[in-house]
Image: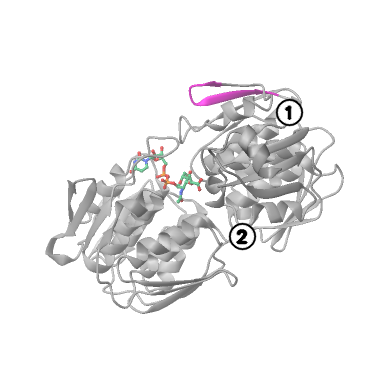
Amino acid sequence: MDKLVVKGPGRLAGTMNVSGSKNTALPLMAGAILAPGISTISNIPSLRDISTFARVMRVTGTRVDIDDSAGLVTIDATNIEDTVAPYELVKRMRASFYMLGALLGRCGEAKVSLPGGCAWGPRPVDLHIKGVQAMGATVDLEQGYVIAKAVGGRLKGGSFRLEPSSVGATINLLLAGSTARGGSRIENAAMEPDVVVFGECLREMGARISGLGTSTIEIEGVDELKPVDFANCPDRIELGTYMIAAALCGEPGSPVRINGADDRHLGKVFVDAFTATGASIEVGDNYIDVTAPEKLSSVSIETGIYPGFPTDLQAQWTILLSQSEGNGKVVDKVYHDRFKHIPELHRMGINAIVVGNEVVVQGKTKLTGAQVMSTDLRASVSLVLAGMVASGTTEVLRVYHLDRGYENLENKLSGAGIDITRESYDEWASPVEERQMSA
Ligand code: EPZ
């Protein structure tokens, strides 16, 4: 198993590159199943979630070739031989549930394992299921699997209102509705860039979709989609993470350049909160320059669906609050218990108290290095940020969580001046054995 060893406090300087978006790459891959033939998707990050999803797709007979060095995925969906997404793979990654809409849209049937648990939750899929039922699918639950069948072999289309708005459910209904016999409407649809870019890809494949980026999406079903060559967008959550890193560890007055950034994907709420801390940004063509202030002002945030503050950046924001003048608060209105990183941060000296779906953070707290445990993707990166700020050595354990969503993180950070290395370790060795092993 691997850990990241960070020696702080560190100074971030120079340039960092943003990779392709994980949460857009996954629906783009699922969408290729709708079209018989060979599609390619470029700017795909080399991540565990991508390889996991490729394995899920291959179960159906779809050929998926990943060229990590080129960031290119080639998908041959000419022949779909099976319409199942098995538990042993779906349990590893919730987004595998996109196979429900993809297989219903292509084959009129799907047998997809329910995702199972998550580090925080609950994370139900009731909206996905009710939505495809509204489009004309029958759905049964058998031994932990959702068995969906389009009545008459092809979905008829239908209207459905998402309460609450859901990124995943919007994506699944776009997958299912694009090849339905009739029209469909998704109300209270998600407006995240992941959904908009995915919808644009479906339109290039011949789907008839309007209203992308608004809360009402209309789909006019077509008989068949055609393969596509499509470029994935940059990862907005990775971008926001590096902006926070620059505000925390950048040299005041010296900008840190973040390349491959699309500032439009961050949403106004995040950008306004970020600049309210005193950090400044300069938006260029495909890059953002971030300059840290002499002193960070404490800015409380509340997460929300796009264009609200992304819930995937609230853990990282907590570290910013810990180094800001004054006290601040993070309220997560999307997930009410996404605070597993706080007990780990207490080990580093953070002064933060979780009350319900809020965490109150006392600013300008000196952090010290410690061994800390990753619990989920975004929590683990907040521990790395804390290690960059803390005095001493921080070991972030179980970085397989982090490898799900951050490509080459240690190389990107060390390339910008941070002392961070990846080391393997035996999770079960006692400290004495560990010392003897490393002697
Ligand atoms: C997507 O998850 C992202 N994952 C998450 O990012 C992100 O945190 C989330 O959207 C919110 O922005 C991917 O894109 C792969 P939701 P998703 O359905 O689609 C409730 C990361 O770190 N809900 O938008 O699963 C749900 O409980 C990951 O990259 C239902 O009630 O999220 C939540 O409160 C973590 N019933 C709210 O909707 C449903 O059927 C939003 O969830 C579905 C969702």
First in sequence: mark 1 vs mark 2: 2
Find out whether residue 154 is within the magenta segment. no
Up-down relation of residue 393 to residue 231 (above or below): above
Task: Report x, y in % for residue 306.
Answer: 51, 45
Contact flag, marks 1 and 2 (Cβ < 8 Å): no
Give the secondary structure at mark 1: loop
Give the amino acid at mark 2: Ser
Closer to the camera in the image, 49 or 307 = 49
Closer to the camera in the image, 272 or 414 = 414
Closer to us: mark 1 or mark 2?
1
Residue 263 image-quadrant placement:
bottom right
Task: Report x, y in % for residue 412.
Answer: 70, 55
Q: Residue at x 75, y 52 (%)?
A: 414
Up-down relation of residue 342 to residue 210 (above or below): above
- Please state if 13 lies on the left or on the right of 46 as rendered: right
Q: What residue did someone put label 2 on?
A: 19
Q: Which disc, if any, is residue 126?
A: none
Ligand 1 is found in the corner quadrant, namely top left
Q: Is residue 239 visible?
A: yes
- Please state if 137 lies on the left or on the right of 341 as rendered: left
Q: What residue did someone put label 1 on?
A: 367
Find out whether residue 355 is within the magenta segment. yes
Q: Residue at x 34, y 61 (%)?
A: 175
Q: Residue at x 32, y 65 (%)?
A: 59
Task: Report x, y in % for residue 99.
Answer: 32, 59
